[in-house]
Image (spheres, rainbow, N blue to C red):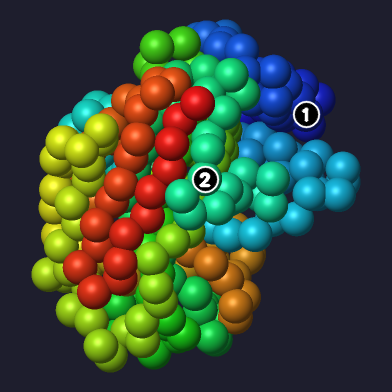
Amino acid sequence: MALDRKDIEALAAHLESAELEARDVTKITDDYPQMDWADAYDIQDEIRRRKEARGHKTVGLKAGLTSFAKMKQMGVDVPCFGFVSDYMARPDGGEIQTSELIHPKVEAEICIVTKAPLKGPGCHVGAVMAAIDFVLPAVEIIDSRYRDFKFDLKSVIADNTSASRFVIGGRSRRVEELDLRTLGVVLEKNGQIVAMAAGAAVLGHPAAAVAMMANHLGARGQEIPAGTFIMTGGVTEAIAVAAGDNVNVRFQDLGSVSMKFV
Ligand code: OOG
Ligand code: MG
């Protein structure tokens, strides 16, 4: 740890107010170049603590930058992990208020809900497959608090990996009914196909993102409890959206997820 507790708390307050006020800020490593990985996750944990202290429930975990398309788009080569809160959830087919956001982008994500705890180190795809209760599709609306979506990995981890809104839709399926690697995803904006991929775009297998998350949390003395909703990361690059846009994502065997930006 390179930062002291006072800096961690101040940076968490700084980034969380930027989120809540839909105001962009410069990346925090510009002012704190010495910040290390533990500091970045400590700032994120402090943001989570602040939200929970105000009564917001943490309702899921997310892996980010897990597909090559996303890593290439953002210029990083390692995934990151974050959380989603109750107030970030929006209904399938509903409206997303862009006035509450800075510069939203959508991501198509294969998600799972666990039926058993997962704890690293040593967690692998097999352990994750055994712990999956069911699979369901979602769209994540990310909104980096950093100006022009420009950040480095430590800054984005501290900023709770750009978590902003998410929409769960479609239908759930048992994992045995699916091949998570060949599961096709087609992302449409205003009726046009703008991106597509298969599940294997996520680290070769979406369950690998969950294993990596369990190993990451294990190193921090934490685990993934049973009953956790987990987003495994955008399968394609993220697509910028603005008021007036309609987004519909078709997931093979899992139905579709849609929303309108107003
Ligand atoms: C970081 C969050 C990435 C994903 O699914 O890859 C993410 C970002 O690109 O702003 O949620
Ligand atoms: Mg995402």
Residue for point 75% across, 55% down: 57
Secondary element at tag 2: loop
Q: Using residue 22 as the reference point, say whether residue 51 is left or right of it.
A: right
Q: Position of residue 12 (x, y in %)?
A: 71, 28
Q: Residues within 10 Å of mark 1 (few under 14, many from 20)?
A: some
Residue 129: image quadrant is: bottom left
The residue pinned by badge 1 equals 9
Q: Is residue 252 above or below residue 140?
A: below
Q: Position of residue 107 (x, y in %)?
A: 34, 43
The residue pinned by badge 2 equals 94
Seen from the viewer's position, the closer of residues 171 and 132 is: 171
Q: Amino acid at mark 2?
A: Gly
Seen from the viewer's position, the closer of residues 160 and 5 is: 160
Secondary element at tag 1: helix
Residue for point 36% across, 86% down: 174
Seen from the viewer's position, the closer of residues 187 and 19 is: 187
The numbered mark at residue 137 is none
Q: Residues within 10 Å of mark 2 (few under 14, many from 20)?
A: some
* The N terminus lies in quadrant: top right
Q: Position of residue 198 (x, y in %)?
A: 14, 60
Q: Using residue 197 as the reference point, say whether residue 29 is left or right of it.
A: right
* First of labels 1, 2 by sequence position: 1
Q: Amino acid at mark 1?
A: Glu
Q: Nearer the viewer, mark 1 or mark 2?
A: 2
